[in-house]
Amino acid sequence: MPAVAMSAMPTTEVLKQQIVDETILSPRFYTTDFAALDRIDVGPVRDEWEVLLAQMEADPNRLHFRRRDRFTGIVEALEPDVRDEFIAFLLSSMTSEFSGCIFYSEIARRTTNPDIRRLMRLLTRDESRHAGFIRDSLKDAGLPISLDFLTRAKKHHYFRPKFILYATYLSEKIGYARYIAICRHLEAHPENNFHPLFDRFEEWCNDEYRHGEAIALLIRADPKLTRGVNRLWIRFFLVSVYATMYCRDHMRPALHRAMGLDITNYDYQVFKICSDISRQVFPILLDTDNPKFRDAMEAMRLASLRLEAAREKAGLRKLIARAGASAAVGWAFLRLLSVRTKANALPARVLHPATW
């Protein structure tokens, strides 16, 4: 085991502070109008709803996340830059999974809608397993992190129920697209599979896929959510989620190099998969192949780097740097929003098998 890697391992307290720090790219904790969720009616999609919920209740992954082995020494032996970025990836993923677990559990506790309560209990079960498995992987690397402190340390952001549906749908589907793209790549290039966690990705991402299917049914149950001004909100969330992924991934060059992935090509592959899937629910699709879109996305990446660099400054220099970088981020975001979208006719049936 390389001594330099061991000597540079971060402490648990340092990692906890990284989790708590709020940046434009960090995972969030949410709250919402729970009474509005009580009024959701799945009647228009009842047939598909019952099929999907039965699949989830059968719990096809009930044995997948049980501990069969330990991953001791693997993370510590990675090259320092790969190790640091892999740990950051694990932290971000664990925080996202745990925030979902807490939020879904709260909805299940507070809602009186039996359909919503039924779904949220299933989502809580799955996200808890995912977060726990990542936590155990960190513990095997000598980095034990209790997740309980997050409920006290992280700020909770209020989102209207429809925004929760858009954001959750995209989070689950792009999560699927990310994991399945990595899974297929590592199947073709096993020499780049440097951690056993990747061997769990296919079943893991199928959980994410089913979660997204359930949220798609909730959106399609209310036609208003895909019409009128809500088309603009859908566009906003698509751009936000894609831009966040693009910027975050490009901040982890060593991790992607270790997996044998070109970051930009990988991200646009993920965008294509996510766009293909979202035909089931969104009346518009982003034209991610448009050169104007790609130029604006690259401008967003450069602006986000400026914003991260500004956090390291102090006093007046920090304020000036943050103001300039924030303006650049805002302008790049507007450029992304201005790119013409592609119209999509919603299919009669919502559910679509995971074929990627």
Image: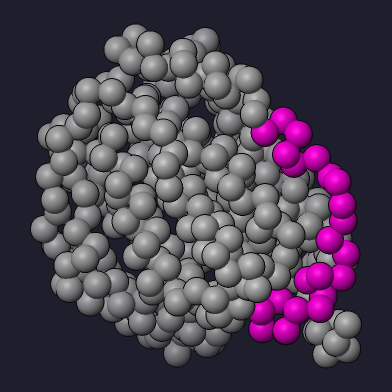
Would you say residue 67 sits in the magenta stretch? Answer: yes
Quadrant of res 217 = top left
Please state the horizontal and vertical placement of residue 190, each as a whole percent of the image: 64, 67
Q: Main secondary structure of the magenta part?
A: loop
Please state the horizontal and vertical placement of residue 259, each as a whole percent of the image: 58, 73
Q: Residue at x 38, y 11 (%)?
A: 47
Whether residue 21 sits left or right of residue 10 in the image: it is: left
Placement of the N terminus among the 4 image quadrants: bottom right
Quadrant of res 270 = bottom left
Q: Nearer the viewer, residue 310 or 59?
A: 59
Whether residue 234 sits left or right of residue 106 in the image: it is: left
Q: Which residues are magenta?
A: 61-88
Q: Nearer the viewer, residue 106 or 234?
A: 234
Q: Nearer the viewer, residue 70 or 33?
A: 70
Q: Residue at x 79, y 60 (%)?
A: 138
Whether residue 106 sits left or right of residue 113 in the image: it is: right
Please state the horizontal and vertical placement of residue 58, each as a whole percent of the image: 63, 20
Q: Residue at x 78, y 71 (%)?
A: 75
Residue 28: tell me if it is visible: yes
Q: Residue at x 61, y 44 (%)?
A: 204
Whether residue 89 sits left or right of residue 266 in the image: it is: right
